[in-house]
Structure formats: structure tokens, C-alpha cells
Amino acid sequence: MLGAVSGAMDAASGMLGGQAAGAAAGNARLVFYKGENLGLPLMNLAGAQAPEVRRPIDAGAVIEFIHMGHVHLDNSKNFHHDPKRDDAVETFPNGARLRGFQFRAALHREALLLSGMMTGCQSVLDALEKSKGGLGQMVGMAADMLGAGGGGAAAPTAGEVNAMGALVRSAAARVNSASATYRDIHQAGIDLQQARCNYRAFQQRLLAPPANDPGGGLLGKMPGLGGNIPPQVADVLNFVTGLAFKPMDVYQHFYVRIALDLEASIERTVRRYTVAALQGPLTPAFYLWYPLPPGPAATGGGGAGGPAPTGIGFLDDARQRFEQLRSDVEDFSNTIRDFVEPDPNQPPAPGDAYLQEAFQIVPPPAPPNSPGPLPPKELATLITSGFKAGLGTSSLPGFIETIITEITTVNNEFLREIYKKLMDRPAVQPINEYSVFKAARRRMLDRLVNLVMENVQFLQTAKDFGFNMQGVNVQPGQALLDKGLDELNTQVLRRMNVALELTIGELVDKLEGIRQQAESATALAYEGYLGAFPWLLALNFRNTFMPVWQLIMDNTFGKMSGPIGDVMRQARDAMNTAKSRVDDARTVAMRLQRIKDRATREGVQAGLGGQNLTGYRDDWAAELPPDQVQPKPPVMPFFPFSRRVSLAAAVSIARNEYDNVRASHKWDLAGDSLQV
């Protein structure tokens, strides 16, 4: 029966990604905020009505541009223009304002941003639902019988995101033509905000934690064990068993807290950058973040044997720049650089300052007469609160919070570096998996190994974790003291290296999948990456935390005999089963063959004088053959374009069109902005 249930759930999850209709649900309350004045005389800011309804429309009237839920006022005379490209540098003669194609490009980027955010949300929920099938369902039932289950209203499902994604796609389709009309641009802004409000309401449902277990969790239900364990040890073991049986629940809870905090920051920054570009004006309107490639657009076939031009000016220029970089490096195909190494030949990206703001590194400027923006929440605090909610507990042992903080810091710093590089480099350049892994190994491996070793030694020596059980003094990890730490260091180094490969492999799969999907649709806006950032940050944390935590437990509590050791091993087996399918696939694809061969041939040779790691370190430092950039499957199921139109004229606003749209103006209904 469980097999049939698992198969049915797998089939259902395969229909996700926009192919199946989402669950029927009403729209959330639609809210708007007042944005900046983009070009309207100050006397007309009192409302969104024409200054004189009897006056001819071509004399100018108040129009609205709705972006990220903010209503910006402008003059109708600034809207229309002849065909303009949003993928090229355009001129604005005599200080003219040619807003139609800029409005349109901004809405395209907003749709990409929202679809990336919704993709992350659905992916996390899909992983949670898959964990409930088959063995996962059995584990869940066992946990419920032991008192760890929740209750209450039905949990949100991945399929519910489909309807929100469909609304984003339909809004983008409305403004993906060669003629931009005020009616369509205004309605697309409203529809995107409706999709956002629906999505935010859905996220709030994800915050509800499971019911707490007043009986003490899993350990409290085990006869002859719970009463003999000191509170400090019980806290750790409850955390271990809870995480083993509910890893995806925990993942969902810290993901949604990261998403709610960072998505608001990213949206605020994208909107501010859009307003600056409109007022600048800055072009290319659709590719604001990337540095402009030098020279004119490619007009030939991209050189001998090169790719044919796309006809999209910015992409062809970027591809030309990429081909120049390739030709500057002798034997480029066999040369792999650290991914985040700076390129002295690449000009700085204009979006760099905004990226720092979006990632909450540099706060946005405070508005006039304001005490200033609230400081951002620490990501580690968000993740810790997610652990508590997912496990149904009010506190975590102090050393576990320290581990969470350290892993959050390592991953956050590295992923921010990756994102800066994605903006600085040619947009069409493929993301090479090994070059990213090489960068991660240099910046993360030693820090993660040290984190494991420090906590293993802490648990071995901490008096709080020594206790008497059945007349025997028990200390976690005591068996290791006779072996020394050299062997453990070797084991940890080897296993963390492989774990890091798996983590980076999955990260690059997602990033390169987004890049290929966007490039094929001529929609390589940076917002595609930005929308996925909170999800990828949570995914990277999950994929890094689990092996670090397992190594610590395996080499402390996991070495103990008796019932506590049995609990630890059962918890480890449950966690391993949940992730084995993914790990196996990535190991076959990415693990360094030299390491496996050497481990099989020589094993680990530890001695009293210390471990000689030279051979293994040489293997880990050896470079894999460069990726052949095989096509990646689509990552974003709600990607709003199959082929984006970049050339569009803005149609002059006729009186009857204006009157019809004015009935749905939102300025008078908008509240004060929550964003700067």
C-alpha cells in the first residue's frame, strides 16, 4: 500500500511546475503603496485625475505606472514613442522622456523576479511532500505514534503555487508584444501585484509551526531511557531525533523565514533601481545590472565556427565579449579558474551598489524626516527560528546555535560572491561546475572541517555531557580519545570534500539551468537569479549543515554503545535514507575518481606521527575536465516567456483608452510606502 501511495505522490509532484492547475483559492486582499513622482508637475500630485477632464488628452494627463505594488505618477506625454529596444543603449534627444518601453521592461523584470521566488517556494514544498511518500510516510506515522506529530488545518501544498505562477505568466504575456499600450501596462502592474499579494498570503500560512509535543518528543516515549538522561544530553538527543525524522519540515520553516525577509529587501532594491533608471534615464532598460559590453553589436556569425547572432543586441554584444575572453586564454578548454576570481579586463557592473543593498550588506538611504530603516534580521536568527518551528521546540542547545551561525555565515558569504560574479561576467557565459567547486573548496572546506573538529572535541570534553547510566560513566566520543584526532581529521576532510561537491553540484545545476532557460527566451535579466537567491541560500545551508551535523554526531554520540547509541544510529539511518537518492546521483556524476581509487587502494593510513595527507590533498586539488555545458532542464516552471520581444513602440494614449483605465487608477487607494 505504501508503494502505491508513494507512486501516486511522485506522479502528483511531476505535474507541478505550471502544468497542472493549482488548488482553487480566492485572491488575497490587493494593496498598493505610493511611489515616486516620475515627471508630473507638482500641482497635479493631489490625485490621479486629469487636470482638466475637458482638456484634450494630448495636452497631458496623469497616468500611473504600477511596479512592485507601488503607484508612480507620470504625465501621459512621456509615454508614447517610436519603436525602441530594451536590450540596447537608446538615446533620449533633447531631454525627452520615452517611458513606454522602460515601463514594459520593468514589468518583464518584475515577472522574472516573482517567478523565481515562486519557483523556490514550490521546490521546497515539493521536497517536503516527496519526503512523505514511501519510507518518508512510514517515518512520519512512526513519529506521530511517538508523539511528535502536529495537527490542525491542512498544510499548504506545492500545487497551490501553480495558480500564482500562472497569474505572473499571463501578466507578462499581456506586455510581451511589439506594441505597448497604457491599458496593458497598467493592468499588468495590477495583475503582478495581485500575484504578489496571493504569494505573500500563502507564505504566511507556511509560518505556522507544528503542535509542540508536551511529552518530551521521541526520547520521552522510550521506556527505560528518558528518565536516566540529564537535561543537557536530552536536549541534544531530542534535536537529533527530531531533525532525523523531520528534516524537510525544518528546511521549509527556515526557508520561508529567509524568503520573507530577503525577498522584501530584493524587491525594494529592484524597484529603487528601476526608478533611478527611469529618471536617469539608464539603458539597456531590460539589462540594467550587467556591464555594457564594449564595441558594437556583432553583425556576423560570431566568427569562424562561432554561434549565429541572436538578433538581440545586448546578448550578441555579451557573446562577442565572451568569445574575446576565450581567445585571450591559451587552450581555454583546459584552463579552469576559480569562479569568483576578479577579471581585470571586465568593467565593473553598474548594479553593484544595488546588489549590496539587496543583500542587506549596505542599508538603503533613509527617507527625509525618517528615523531610518530597520536593521535587517540576522540570517542565522531566521534559520534558528525555523529550526525551532520545524521541531516544535522553544530552544536549542547553545552549541547547535553556534553551528547554525557558522554555517550560515560561510554559505552566505560564498553565495553573495557567486552572485556578484554572475553580475560582473558576460551574461551569456556558462557557469562551470568545477570552477565554482574550486572556489568553494578554497573558501569553505577548511572552515567546515574546523567546525566539525572543534565541536567533536567540545562534546568529548564537556562535563555537561558526561553522566552515569546503569553504574557506568558515559561520555560521548570517549572511544575516539584512544585513536587520536589525526584519523578523524582525515575522515572529516574526505567526507566534507565530497559533501561540498554535492552541495555545489546542486547549486550550479539550478543557476546554470536558470541561465540556459533565460538565454533561450532572450530574457537574461539578472532578476532571474535574484528571485532564486533566498531559495538557493536555504538549499545551500541545508546541504552543508546536514553532513557537518552528521559528522559531529557520528563521532560523538554515535560511537556510544547501549540505548543512546541505538537511538543515534536509527536517527542517522532515517536521515541517510531521506537523502541517499540525491547523494548517489551526485556522487556518480561528480566525485573525484582519483579520491575513490586511492581510498580503495590505500585506505586511510594514520600513524602516531600524524596523518600524511599529501596524496589525498593532491587528488582533491586536481582539476576535473571542464564541463561540456550540457543542457540543463528548466528550473523555473513559471518562467514568463517562451520568447521575449525586445523591440516595442509605445502607442499614444487615446481619450477613450485613458478614460477606461482611469477607472482602475490606484493612487487614491494607495497607502504610504513601506519601502524606501
Image (cartoon, helix red, strand yellow):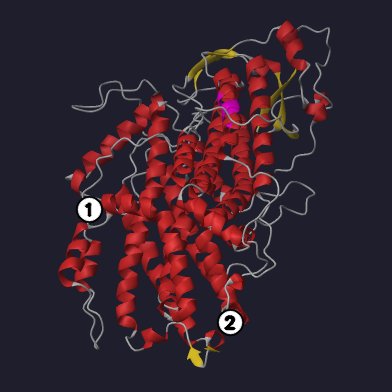
Q: Amino acid at mark 2?
A: Ile
Where residue 664 sits in the image (x, y, percent)?
A: 76, 19
Q: Earlier in the sequence, mark 2 or mark 1?
A: 2
| Residue 435 visible | no
Residue 171, percent from left and from top = 60, 23
Between 494 and 427, the one lying in front of the other is: 494
Relative to 611, residue 532 above or below:
above
Q: Is residue 166 magenta?
A: yes
Residue at 84% across, 27% down: 46
Q: Give 588 or 332, whichever is nearer the viewer.
A: 588
Q: Position of residue 250 (x, y in %)?
A: 56, 57
**Which residue is denoted by mark 1 in the rendering?**
624
The secondary structure type at the circle numbered 1 is: loop
Residue 281 in which image quadrant: top right
Residue topped by disc 2: 229
Nearer the observer: mark 2 or 1; the answer is 2
